[in-house]
């Protein structure tokens, strides 16, 4: 029996090209309370848009972007802000409920 399957990344990356979906995905990762989960989610969004293209749009070096979004990465706020702006996203602070 032949079954057609698709890698989940393909559907995920397609969805993450939508800024609304990307924002919800990143928000859910941030709610996990683990910075590594957030960085991996941010990397998923960057990969969906193309790492090289995302790095250029954010005026960041591609290799540094990979390092920044790796597990254990520690991006500067200015780099994180530039990256999010290049994706039509922004940082926001809310009162915890």
Image: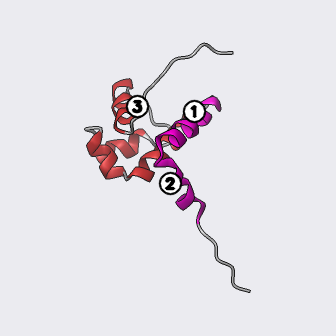
Q: Residues within 10 Å of mark 2 (few under 14, many from 20)?
A: some
Q: How is the image coloured?
A: secondary structure
Magenta stretch in the rendered image: 7-32
The residue carrying mark 3 is: 75
Give the label, 2 or 3, closer to the camera.
2
Judge whether residue 81 is colored magenta: no
Q: Position of residue 51 (x, y in %)?
A: 36, 50
93 in relation to 83, above or below: above
In three-dimensional space, the C-alpha distance between marks 2 and 3, rounded to whole angstroms, equals 22 Å
The residue carrying mark 1 is: 27
Majority SS type along the magenta span: helix
The residue carrying mark 2 is: 13
In three-dimensional space, the C-alpha distance between marks 1 and 3, rounded to whole angstroms, equals 17 Å
Locate residue 46 relative to residue 35 in the image: left or right.
left
> Which SS class for mark 3?
loop
> Which SS class for mark 1?
helix
Q: Position of residue 52 (x, y in %)?
A: 31, 51
Locate residue 8 relative to residue 82 in the image: left or right.
right
Quadrant into which the N terminus falls: bottom right
Residue that appears at 57% across and 40% down: 25
Q: Earlier in the sequence, mark 2 or mark 1?
A: 2
Is residue 36 visible from the viewing direction of this image? no
């Amino acid at each position: 029996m032949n079954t057609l399957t698709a890698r989940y990344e393909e559907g995920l990356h397609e969805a993450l090209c939508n800024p609304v979906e990307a924002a919800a995905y990143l928000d859910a990762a941030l709610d996990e309370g683990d910075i590594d989960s957030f960085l991996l989610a941010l990397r998923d969004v960057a990969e969906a848009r193309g790492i090289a293209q995302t790095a250029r749009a954010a005026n960041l070096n591609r290799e540094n972007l990979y390092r920044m979004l790796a597990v254990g990465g520690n991006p500067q706020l200015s780099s994180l802000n530039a990256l999010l702006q290049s994706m039509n996203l922004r940082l926001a602070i809310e009162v915890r409920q």
